[in-house]
Image (cartoon, grey):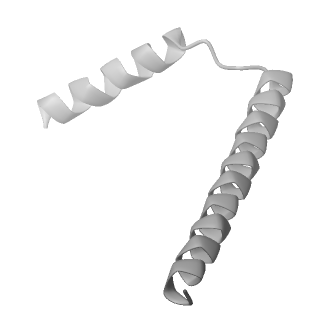
Amino acid sequence: MNKLTTYFKESVIELKKVTWPTKKETYNYTLLVIGISIGIALFLGLLDYLFTQGFQALINR
C-alpha cells in the first residue's frame, strides 16, 4: 500500500510542474486537428475514388 500512496503523491507533484495550454491555445490546436483530419479524409477519399475508377476500367476492358 505504501508504493501506491507514493505513486499518487509523486503523480500530484509532477502534475503541478506541467505547463497547461491556455484556452486559446487549446481552441487553436483543436481546430488544427479537425482541419488536418478533414484534409486527410478528403485526400484518402479521393485516392479511393481514383483507384476504384482505375480498377473498374481494368475490369471492364
Of 8 and 46, which appears nearest the observer? Answer: 46
Q: Is residue 59 above or below residue 19?
A: below
Q: Is residue 31 above or below residue 50?
A: above
Of 59 and 33, which appears nearest the observer? Answer: 59
Q: Is residue 16 above or below residue 37?
A: above
Outermost residue on the bottom side: it is: 60
Figure disc tally: 0
Identity of the residue drawn at 57% across and 68% down: 51
The image quadrant of residue 7 is: top left
Spot occupied by residue 30 in the image (x, y as percentages of width and height) = 75, 38
Identity of the residue drawn at 68% across and 56% down: 41
Q: Is residue 49 left or right of residue 60?
A: right
Spot occupied by residue 53 in the image (x, y as percentages of width and height) = 64, 75
Identity of the residue drawn at 58% across and 71% down: 54
Of 42 and 37, which appears nearest the observer? Answer: 42
Outermost residue on the front side: it is: 61
Q: Is residue 54 above or below residue 17?
A: below
Spot occupied by residue 31 in the image (x, y as percentages of width and height) = 81, 38
Spot occupied by residue 56 in the image (x, y as percentages of width and height) = 58, 83
Q: Is residue 22 left or right of residue 10?
A: right
Q: Is residue 26 left or right of residue 7?
A: right
The image quadrant of residue 14 is: top left
Of 60 and 39, which appears nearest the observer? Answer: 60
Image quarter (top left, top right, bottom left or bottom right) of the N terminus: top left
Image quarter (top left, top right, bottom left or bottom right) of the C terminus: bottom right
Identity of the residue drawn at 14% across and 29% down: 3
Q: Is residue 48 left or right of residue 33?
A: left
